[in-house]
Image (spheres, rainbow, N blue to C red):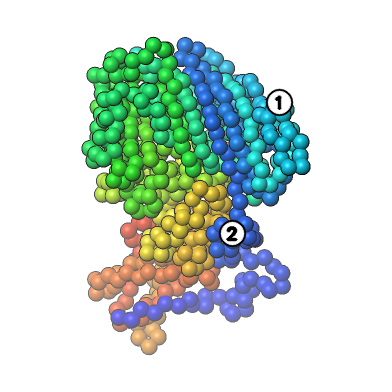
Amino acid sequence: MRLIFRLLPLLSASALAAQQPSTAGAPDTSAFRRLELPAPNSIRTGSGAPGPDYWQQRADYVIRATLDTSARSLRGEERITYSNNSPDTLRYLWLQLDQNVFTSQSRGSKIFDQRNRFGSGGAEGGMRILKVAQPAVAAARGQAASGAGQLAYGVNGTVMRVDLARPLPPKAKQVLEISWSFPFGPNRSRMGIEEIDGGVTYEVAQWYPRLAVYDDIRGWNTEQYYGQGEFYLEYGSFDVSLAVPADFIVAATGVLRNPGDVLTPAQRSRLAQARTSASTVVIRGREEVGQPASRPATGYGTFTWRFTADSVRDFAWAASRTFIWDAVGVNGGGTLAMSFYPPSTEALWKEATQYAKFAIENYSTQWAPYPYPTANNVRGSEGGMEYPMIVFCNRPTPETLYSVTDHEFGHTWFPMVVGSNERRYPWMDEGFNEFINYYNWTKRFGLPPEHRGSIRDYLAMATSRQERPVMTFADQLPAMFVGPAAYDKPALALRLLREVVVGPERFDPAFKEYFRRWAYKHPTPADFFRTIEDGVGEDLSWFWRSWLYTTAQLDQAVDSIALADSAGVESRIFLRNAGGIPMPVDLELLLDDGSRQRLKLPVEIWFGGDRYTAIVAGPKKVNAAAVDPESRYPDVRRENNRWSAGTSQTGR
């Protein structure tokens, strides 16, 4: 049987000409018009790669902090070395004070009015800045020495501007010394305290003044932290010393540099064993919690734990006197995965370290190797949040604990290594991460997940009449649509791009190339689009525009089937793109002899508009047709996907 497809002229030639884009200055409204992106330059090239003049700032931190468990507060001092790699001279620096979202007068508490997230009652939150200064700087040739002294600063909500004593020229460094304190309050967002098993677990994040990003796109990125959007940070190194009660165990970003001071000989031996073990090794067991022998002997009330990390954009930590602690080797011992959890959660959490091992090793194999020496999973008050080398997870069942562990460690690739601006483009970390989560879940359980790149969750938003474009900034999304718009829809779109539009054999190398090009850098959406198109070898403007910039929907329909005699029997299948998103068409035909045929029509069939007629030459007649017979697409109106002889025509 011969299959012939062509677009039939349903309109007259003059009518068709009237619908074509005008060459006399009328705008091109075709879904296939080229997506307008910022002009490429020597910083960000037309191929999507960083150019020869790409630059990026750097911030290196030395931090000393003390946890006061009686007052439930933290006091710290930091020395920041800021490297100005830009071509610009800077007269002031902007820093982030995200703890200020927890004040009763913060914009975040007013906008979202979520007491369970921002706290109510108890201590007033927010950072108290105690000192902002610069140390003495030796004289450079031809310049006078710069003495130590206080620097003027001003706080605007969750950001702080520090005025420099003298301008910071290109290729120069500025050192800041800042002291601060803040209280831990109830019901924090992304961090906080949990009273459990006779102790308190402290999860500490967004806890120190952090340099805002100064980039080639927008200069200073000073978006307020409202609590819903996440972060955009500079890369650098951390040297962090944490003074905590002597009976506490600490988990943190980085590598513990003084194990001889804070761990027992048995714990150090067990950690060495765990690094090369495929099975979980208990570092401090349930029966050891609360036992003096599980901590080194000391005549002091506190221990100082020192951690260092490089090529990271943030630092987080957790501490508790009730932690069980276990560990396992990952990627042949190159990484040590560890879990920290209270005794009452042991039945569930004793498997958590293996969950981390499975997630990290599979992402390393499929996309890119995990780049860090440690991976810590902490059970505390926060349901799920990611930081470099440490995640906070709290879920009640094995399936949900695996899911959140897999998701939070997936964030290592996006945005911990590929450092996009999460406040403006949450889909570039949440959507990308949920996309890779989908394949990890499927590999582990043999079935697709319900809530990772979910058709069901996306359709709930798409059919609500309140859908927001994926490109919406994080804090401008209604809370109920953060998941569907920033997570589900972009992850689903990437799955369709990979599996239906270009195929894994072309998509996967391009996606890996995006990771390689932009590791430890700051990509924009245009850099991603151009890199993928550069790798797969075609213009995907129609795809990016439809799925990410608009709220158009996918609604493919079979309007009718007709027969015509033209040198024999000829079946005509009238297809319609009713929702606005052009996509390839997967068509199943039922022929008059009872046999079935599958046709795959490319997206280019919609070049001529939202109608297309497929012509199937005889002698067999087509009695019925169905688009997307396996329901792979998130079609918003599946009742028009099928047509069979004897049914009413739905219109052409």
Residue lying farthest to the front in this orientation: 141
- Helix, strand or loop for disc 2: loop
On the image, the x and y values in percent for residue 280 come to 24, 35
The residue identified by callout 2 is 51
Q: Nearer the viewer, residue 104 or 148?
A: 148
Q: Is residue 133 left or right of residue 429?
A: right
- Helix, strand or loop for disc 1: strand
Residue name at image x 52 percent, y 70 percent? 607
Q: Is residue 171 left or right of residue 471?
A: right
Circle 1 residues within 10 Å: few <14, some 14–19, many ≥20: few
Q: Quadrant of the N terminus?
A: bottom left
Q: Is residue 5 above or below residue 636?
A: below
On the image, the x and y values in percent for residue 378 come to 37, 30
Is residue 371 visible from the viewing direction of this image? yes
Residue name at image x 58 percent, y 39 percent? 59
Residue lying farthest to the bottom in this orientation: 567
Q: Nearer the viewer, residue 620 or 199?
A: 199
Q: Earlier in the sequence, mark 1 or mark 2?
A: 2
The residue identified by callout 1 is 149
